[in-house]
Amino acid sequence: MSDLSTALSRPPRRFGVNPKPLAAALLLIALGAVYLAQAVSGRQAALYIVGALLGISLYHAAFGFTSAWRVFIADGRGAGLRAQMLMLAVGVVLFFPTLAAGSLFGHPVVGLVAPAGTSVLVGAFMFGVGMQLGGGCASGTLYTVGGGSTRMIVTLAAFVTGSVVATAHMPFWTALPSLKPLSMVKTLGAGAAIALNLAIFAAIAALTVFVERRRHGRLVNEPARAPSASPWLQGPWPLFVGALALVLLNYATLALSGRPWGVTSAFALWGAKIFAALGVDVVNWPYWATRANAGALAAPVTHDVTTVMDVGIILGAMAAAALAGRYAPVWKVPARSLIAAVVGGLMLGYGARLAYGCNIGAYFSGIVSGSLHGWLWLVAAFAGNVLGTRLRPAFGLEVERLRSTGC
């Protein structure tokens, strides 16, 4: 027999629902949507709601990019990676024809396509190490903060700091060798690009099956999670449901905002606004001198789509944690774990800017946009995760493995 040496890293389920945090989260979601509809636009309010739904989906499915990669690297278990391949497969089938057409419901749409080069390799590798030390990726940081993780607040603060520092160095990194932005949709056509990507996803999924069976003799079931009276409302959701929810909500983001889901550009913006308030002359940094970034820096954060969705994710995850009876912040965090959160957060933020995105903007949305840099990001970030997984024990962080219990 065998069992999991560790359970999911979240507080144990309490009796029923946590009513006060649930009421607070739902009230903030409702008030935020009303305010955005009046002060900005109905579309911005809808994106805020999409963000909240993403937070609920991420929390209830425990859809972690970081943990999925870690358990495959350390223990050969690939259920999380296979769920990601399902998400990407459905994504390219939905996104590629839409991006080839250039419009959705009469509105123009574009993919997140960026140069593939040195900065992506370095940044994604840094991000991968940071994922394991910080304890989460970009979306994971947001939904675990919303779920009540106090350690991840430290990671998020360092994430924001690393992001804005990276914007000061961007001229150096963008001057290094790189390819021009390349879209498979435009280069190959939607049909051929879909076929090629589906073949790669199938190969990766098959590799995880091979590795898992060779390591454990079988495909290992997901860790058992405590049942609830209303699993769709309180969780837990199967991983494949989380994968489908994320890709459909990403498609809704494309329809509403004209581009796929992103997360970390908002962190750089928040950091730049904080630095500016402290007297730092960020407005004259080349990164913030471009028309788009200068406009975002000058405008209220409520006008920034990514900010609005990020806040929605946090509040949606808070509501989900309260519904599940798991909203229970723990304020005592070991010193080594806090150091890892700071170091990991800085690497996450700095790496995300260099790599033109994170696990969402570069990996998920980059690949479903047909961008070559999304695949380069995947390879480099996975290598970073290998190193980060090996470094975790030095900071007192666990690495989940199956262990034999004996009879």
Image: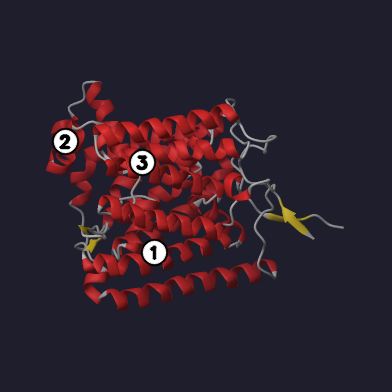
**Distance from Cα at disc 3 to Cα at disc 1:** 21 Å
The residue type indicated by label 2 comes to Trp
Q: Position of residue 119 (x, y in %)?
A: 27, 53
Decide which of tag 1 and tag 2 comes sooner along the chain: 1
In this image, 262 relative to 285: left or right?
right
Answer with left or right where residue 16 lies relative to residue 24: right
> Residue 355, position in %: x, y?
31, 51
Could you tell me which secondary element the residue under label 3 belongs to?
helix
* Residue depicted at x 59% and y 38%: 323
Residue at 39 percent across and 64 percent down: it is 91
In the displayed structure, 101 sits above or below 227; it is below
Up-down: is 389 above or below 98?
A: above
Residue displayed at 24% across by 57% down = 114
**For residue 329, what is the image quadrant?**
top right
- The residue that disc 3 covers is 48
119 relative position to 20: left or right? left
Total marks drawn?
3
Residue 285: mark = 2
Q: Earlier in the sequence, mark 3 or mark 1?
A: 3
Q: Nearer the viewer, residue 14 or 119?
A: 14
Marks 3 and 2, how far apart in space?
Answer: 30 Å
- Which quarter of the rendered picture does the C terminus lie within? bottom right
- Badge 3 crowding class, 10 Å Cα cut-off, few under 14, some 14 to 19, many 20 or more, is many
Tag 2 secondary structure: loop
Q: Which mark is residue 91?
A: 1
Q: Considering depth in this image, is 233 or 51 the residue closer to the camera?
A: 233
Residue type indicated by callout 1 = Gly
